[in-house]
Amino acid sequence: MRALVAGLLILLFFHGLALAQDTEAEIGRRYAKQIESQYKVVHDPALAERVARIGREVAAASDRPEIPFTFKVLDLDSVNAVSLPGGFIYLTTGMVRFVRTDHELAAVLAHEIAHVVRGHGMEMIRRHTQAVFYTMLIAALTRDPNLAKGAQLVSLGVLSSYTREMEQEADRLAIIYLQRTHYTPAGLLTLMERLRWKLEAQPDLGAFADHPTVEERVRYIETELKIRGIPLARRIAGGYLRIEVLVVPEQGREIGELYVDGRLVLRLPGIDGSARDRIQEIARRLDRLFNEDLRPYEVSTRPIGREWGVFARGSLLIVHVTAQDAAFLGSSPREIASGIRARLVGVLTESLWQRRLGTSPNP
């Protein structure tokens, strides 16, 4: 008898859950229809496939992968995204242009997926009315301060129309979901840092001047990443300081070339081995240093006996310029090392400016 009662209770639970999901989906469809009647959906096949592919990967890693998520892009210049009950998620073209990599795009989608998973939309409807919730959605999508004032939205968060508590929960869950994929959770941090800079560059935002909230989110996202032991490899998420190595023939021997963001930083022959081995070892050293946020002022040169080296942070050797290099390149070890340092400082400085201005490195 007890087993029968327990079985009935389980059936009733799942039946109730299915009904709740059906209700969420129906409400979401109604809002989606309104939004798509008001704003143009972008039908670029490549763009739609990219957003849907990344969205599906993240949704599959969420706590409710059974939700039939749909992902669409609206033709709006504002940098934002919103989610509806039932799994309807919209990004603006402004947001798609703003993200630099699939990692940052995955972070946006993970944040919105988390809102759906936790039922934040339904909770906001319960707290307000469907009409007010829709106004909040449109205000978030368009970043229209007049709409925000009209709805008396005093704490509208960047990326959505939810409360601070909901935003923090969605950020925390987004990090967890991204950990389950091949996308780096650091993308959420780099995204919010750049949104913070964007707000600094546009101070007159009326009801959307929510800088302390963005600053707060940057802090707790960074703290959460550190607590979870996730490397703060911003360059991977941001797609900058990309290293490329090539080996080319010259004067009957191999020359290794190293490029950073498409700019030649050094070219050296092989020594007691292949040029490929040597240039790849230098690339590995730079890769580690770039992940640790190497700064231009941390690069220096100094003699190694009668030869010279390029160093990072005082003692970390990047390149040892030998007498053989000098003979082959027709210059002194000191001059070669100084040239490498100058080019490396140049790409690091340019990268800092690009990140500060929110632009992507040149290919």
Image (spheres, rainbow, N blue to C red):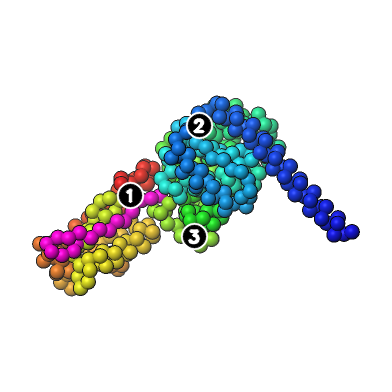
In the rendering, which numbered label is found on residue 230? Answer: 3
- Residue found at x 42% / y 57%: 233
- Residue found at x 82% / y 52%: 9
Residue 250 lies within the magenta run: yes
Residue 211 appears anywhere in the view: yes
In the image, is 114 to the left or to the right of 321? right
Q: Hey, what amino acid is under mark 2?
A: Val
Q: Hey, what amino acid is under mark 3?
A: Ile
Secondary structure under tag 3 reads loop
In the rendering, which numbered label is found on residue 351? Answer: 1
- Of callouts 2 and 3, which one flags the residue occurring earlier in the amino acid sequence? 2
Residue 119, image x, y percentages:
66, 44
Q: Hey, what amino acid is under mark 1?
A: Ser
Residue 344 appears anywhere in the view: no
Nearer to me, 220 or 360: 360
Q: CA separation, marks 3 and 1?
A: 23 Å
Q: CA separation, marks 2 and 1?
A: 34 Å
Q: Which residues are magenta?
A: 238-255
In the image, is 33 to the left or to the right of 19? left
Label 1: few (<14), some or many (≥20) within 10 Å? Answer: many
- Of callouts 2 and 1, which one flags the residue occurring earlier in the amino acid sequence? 2
Task: Write down the residue under mark 2.
Answer: 41
Q: Are marks 2 and 3 in contact (CB under 8 Å)?
A: no
